[in-house]
Image (cartoon, coloured by chain):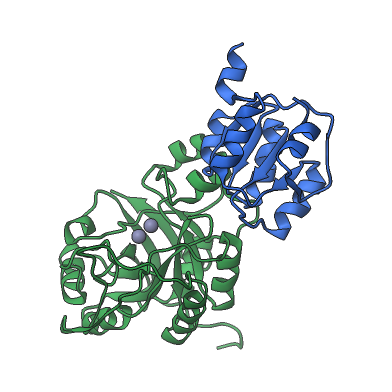
Chain colours: A green, B blue
C-alpha cells in the first residue's frame, strides 16, 4: 500500500441523539441515570449518544461504562449557557479535553453561586446508579463568556460546537441574537423544523448542517419522531462526526422520521 | 428629540464615536432578545438593551435605528464597538438600570416605538 493511502473503513448509518441530560441537570428527572439512559437507547436502536449536562461532564464516564459492550458510543459533551443566554452543545474527543474545558467553564460561572431551588437535585452517579455526591452549586447560570468566546474555547479543546434548540423562543441563538452571527464557527444547528421552513424564516441558517436531538430531560423524551443519522465508520469518534457534518470522506448526515 | 439632547439628559457614556448627533430619535424600543427587535423596532428608534453582542450592530444598521443604549452596566464586546464605528452606529452605555433609563426617556417625551408610528 502506498504511503498516505489509509484503508477505507466500513461506513454505516448510525441513529444518533447528541443532546441528553442526566440526573446531574437540575431540570432532569431522577430516572435519567446512566443505566436507564443506555437501556432506553438500546431499545430505541440509538447507536450514538452525547451526554450534555449543564456546565458539567461528571456523569459522562458512568454512561460510557454502562455502554461498554452494547455497541453504543457515548460522546463527552456539555451544554453551555453563554453571556447572551444562548445554549450551545459542546462535544469533545476525549475525557482529558472535556475535563480541561469543564475547568475553564467553572472559572466563568458566577462566583456568587445561586442556591438550588427546593426539590432540585444535581447528582453525580456511578455506572451502577449509585449517588457519589450531590452538586449543590446551581450549575445552570450564564457564563461570563460570549458565544464567540465559547466557540473559540471549544475549538482549542478540539471539540465541536452545536447551537442548541435554535427554534426555541428563548435560550437559543436565533431568539437571543436574531441570526447566526457571521463566521461563527458552529459546526451545526440543532432544530426541530425541517430545513426549508428554517431557511425561509431564518435565512442566516442556510449553509449550516442541521441536527435533530432530543434535549431529553426524562426517558420518554428519548423516543422521538425524527432522529439524526450519521453515515460514519462503525467505530464512531468525534472526528467521524466532524467529517460527516462537512460531508468529507464519504461520511454524511441526514435527519429522518 | 435630538439624539445629542437625550445623551446629555441621561448622561450616557459614549462607547463609540458619536455618529449622527443631530439625528432625531423617533421612539424607544426595549428588549434583550434580538429576534424581538428584528420583529418590532422601527427606523429612528432608540434601542435600550442589556445585549452587548456584536449582532446588535448589524441589526441597528439594517433597521436604521438612531442608536443603541446598553444599560444596567452591562459590558459590551470590543468587537461590537469596532463594528459599530465601522457601520457608523452610535453605542452608549449606562450603569443605570434599564427601568430607570426607560423612565427617564419617557419623561423626556419619547414614546414607545409602536405609538410613534401611529401618529
Ligand atoms: Zn438548552
Ligand atoms: Zn439541554
Answer with left or right where residue B66 lies relative to residue B50.
Answer: right
Which quarter of the rendered image does ligand 1 occupy?
bottom left
Looking at the picture, how far across and down is residue A101, in whole percent? 49, 78
Whether residue A81 is visible: yes
In this rendered view, identify the residue nearer to me: A139 or B86: A139
Looking at the picture, how far across and down is residue B113, in whole percent? 59, 25
State whether residue B97 is above or below residue B9: below
For this orientation, the residue located farthest to the top is: B119
Looking at the picture, how far across and down is residue A228, in whole percent? 35, 57
Whether residue A14 is visible: no
In this rendered view, identify the residue nearer to me: B100 or A55: B100
The residue depicted at 50 percent of the width and 68 percent of the height is A160
State whether residue A184 is above or below residue A105: above
Looking at the picture, how far across and down is residue B96, in whole percent? 61, 48
The residue depicted at 76 percent of the width and 41 percent of the height is B89
State whether residue B23 is above or below residue B84: above
In this rendered view, identify the residue nearer to me: A144 or B58: A144
Q: Quadrant of the N terminus of chain A?
A: bottom right
* Quadrant position of residue A3: bottom right
State whether residue A182 is above or below residue B9: below
In this rendered view, identify the residue nearer to me: A8 or B56: B56
The residue depicted at 83 percent of the width and 34 percent of the height is B20
Answer with left or right where residue B11 lies relative to residue A168.
Answer: right
Q: How many marks?
A: 0
* Quadrant position of residue B107: top right
Amino acid at each position: 500500500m502506498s504511503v498516505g493511502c489509509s484503508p477505507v473503513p466500513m461506513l454505516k448509518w448510525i441513529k444518533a441523539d447528541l443532546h441528553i441530560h442526566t440526573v446531574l441537570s437540575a431540570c432532569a428527572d431522577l430516572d435519567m441515570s446512566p443505566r436507564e439512559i443506555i437501556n432506553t437507547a438500546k431499545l430505541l436502536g440509538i447507536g450514538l449518544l452525547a451526554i450534555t449536562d449543564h456546565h458539567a461532564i461528571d456523569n459522562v464516564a458512568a454512561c460510557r461504562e454502562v455502554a461498554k459492550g452494547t455497541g453504543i458510543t457515548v460522546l463527552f459533551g456539555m451544554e453551555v449557557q453563554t453571556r447572551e443566554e444562548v445554549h450551545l452543545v459542546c462535544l469533545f474527543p476525549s475525557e482529558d479535553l472535556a475535563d480541561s474545558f469543564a475547568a475553564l467553564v467553572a472559572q466563568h460561572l458566577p462566583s456568587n453561586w445561586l442556591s438550588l431551588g427546593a426539590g432540585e437535585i444535581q447528582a453525580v452517579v456511578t455506572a451502577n446508579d449509585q449517588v457519589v455526591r450531590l452538586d449543590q452549586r446551581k450549575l445552570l447560570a450564564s457564563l461570563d463568556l460570549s458565544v464567540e468566546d465559547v466557540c473559540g474555547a471549544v475549538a482549542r479543546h478540539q471539540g465541536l460546537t452545536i447551537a442548541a434548540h435554535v427554534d426555541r423562543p428563548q435560550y437559543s441563538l436565533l431568539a437571543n441574537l436574531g441570526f447566526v452571527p457571521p463566521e461563527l464557527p458552529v459546526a451545526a444547528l440543532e432544530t426541530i423544523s425541517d430545513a426549508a421552513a428554517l431557511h425561509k424564516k431564518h435565512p442566516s441558517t442556510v449553509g449550516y448542517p442541521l441536527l435533530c436531538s432530543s434535549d431529553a430531560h426524562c426517558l420518554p423524551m428519548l423516543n422521538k419522531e425524527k432522529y439524526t443519522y450519521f453515515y460514519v465508520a462503525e467505530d464512531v469518534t468525534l472526528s467521524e462526526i466532524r467529517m460527516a457534518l462537512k460531508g468529507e470522506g464519504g461520511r454524511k448526515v441526514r435527519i429522518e422520521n | 428629540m435630538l439624539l445629542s439632547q437625550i445623551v446629555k439628559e441621561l448622561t450616557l457614556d459614549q462607547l463609540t464615536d458619536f455618529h449622527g448627533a443631530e439625528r432625531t430619535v423617533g421612539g424607544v424600543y426595549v428588549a434583550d432578545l434580538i429576534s424581538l427587535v428584528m420583529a418590532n423596532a422601527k427606523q429612528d428608534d432608540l434601542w435600550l438593551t442589556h445585549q452587548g453582542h456584536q449582532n446588535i450592530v448589524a441589526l441597528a444598521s439594517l433597521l436604521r435605528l438612531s442608536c443603541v443604549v446598553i444599560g444596567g452596566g452591562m459590558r459590551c464586546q470590543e468587537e461590537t464597538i469596532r463594528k459599530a464605528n465601522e457601520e457608523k452606529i452610535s453605542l452608549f452605555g449606562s450603569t443605570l438600570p434599564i427601568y430607570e433609563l426607560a423612565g427617564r426617556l419617557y419623561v423626556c417625551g419619547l414614546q414607545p416605538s409602536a405609538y410613534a408610528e401611529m401618529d
